[in-house]
Image (tube, helix red, strand yellow):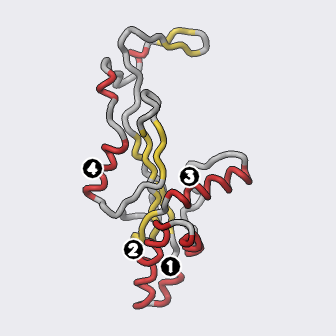
């Protein structure tokens, strides 16, 4: 959780692959592809069974303050989640909390409305305290705001600290 100002994105992606069991053929541009040419090709579908729920369980044991705001489905078994997205809020010195699903849904909706596409990363992780205006819609932002308020009691100038939003 350190270096919020330097590292904007860390991805947690469960292992993805295609089974090499002889039952499937793969083509690109009309030419048959040998999946054996790719690294780490399992022969058994069970080798590809890790999910982000399992990965998150391990992460959550070490960092219980992290809360996911989005999960994206997999490619081998589409019902499983393979991408885990956690968005942290904080400063160089302190992690305040996480963005919740409501905020990420609203951000994607408005970005798509104005730019006709979705974003994967923010252009700049430095959003400022205006992110806390979303506390009325998102319980995770509300919790982060409460953590943000505590240092203000000791040092009112911390109101001007740069708030960073970092996706993991």
**Which of disc 2 and disc 3 is earlier in sequence?**
2
Q: From the viewer's perspective, is 8 left or right of 130?
A: left
Rendered view: 55 above or below 138: above
Tag nearer the camera, 3 or 4: 4
Name the mark on residue 41.
none
Q: Residues within 10 Å of mark 2 (few under 14, many from 20)?
A: few
Disc 1 marks which residue?
161
Disc 2 marks which residue?
93
For residue 114, what is the image quadrant?
bottom right
Using the rendered image of the protein, determine whether residue 91 is visible from the camera's viewpoint. Answer: no
Measured in 3D between alpha carbons, the distance from the residue under mark 3 to the one under mark 4, in whole angstroms, is 24 Å
Q: Residue at x 32, y 45 (%)?
A: 55
Disc 4 marks which residue?
58
**Which of disc 2 and disc 4 is earlier in sequence?**
4
Q: Residues within 10 Å of mark 1 (few under 14, many from 20)?
A: few
Name the mark on residue 121.
3
Instruction: Check if mark 1's residue and mark 2's residue have beta carbons within 8 Å.
Output: yes
Instruction: Check if mark 4's residue and mark 2's residue have beta carbons within 8 Å.
Output: no
**Which of disc 2 and disc 1 is earlier in sequence?**
2
Q: Residue at x 40, y 64 (%)?
A: 3
Badge 2 element? loop
């Amino acid at each position: 959780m350190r270096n919020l100002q330097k590292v904007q994105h860390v991805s947690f992606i469960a292992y993805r692959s295609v089974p090499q069991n002889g039952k499937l053929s793969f083509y690109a541009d009309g030419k048959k592809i040998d999946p054996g040419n790719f690294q780490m090709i399992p022969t058994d579908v069970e080798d590809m069974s890790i999910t982000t729920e399992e990965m998150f369980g391990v992460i959550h044991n070490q960092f219980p303050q992290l809360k996911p705001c989005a999960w994206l489905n997999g490619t081998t078994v589409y019902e499983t989640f393979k991408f885990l997205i956690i968005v942290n809020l904080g400063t160089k010195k302190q992690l305040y909390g996480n963005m919740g699903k409501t905020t990420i849904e609203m951000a994607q909706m408005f970005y798509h409305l104005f730019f006709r596409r979705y974003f994967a990363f923010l252009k700049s992780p430095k959003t400022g305290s205006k992110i806390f205006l979303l506390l009325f819609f998102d319980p995770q932002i509300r919790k982060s705001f409460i953590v943000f308020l505590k240092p203000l009691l000791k040092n009112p100038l911390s109101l001007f600290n740069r708030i960073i939003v970092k996706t993991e």
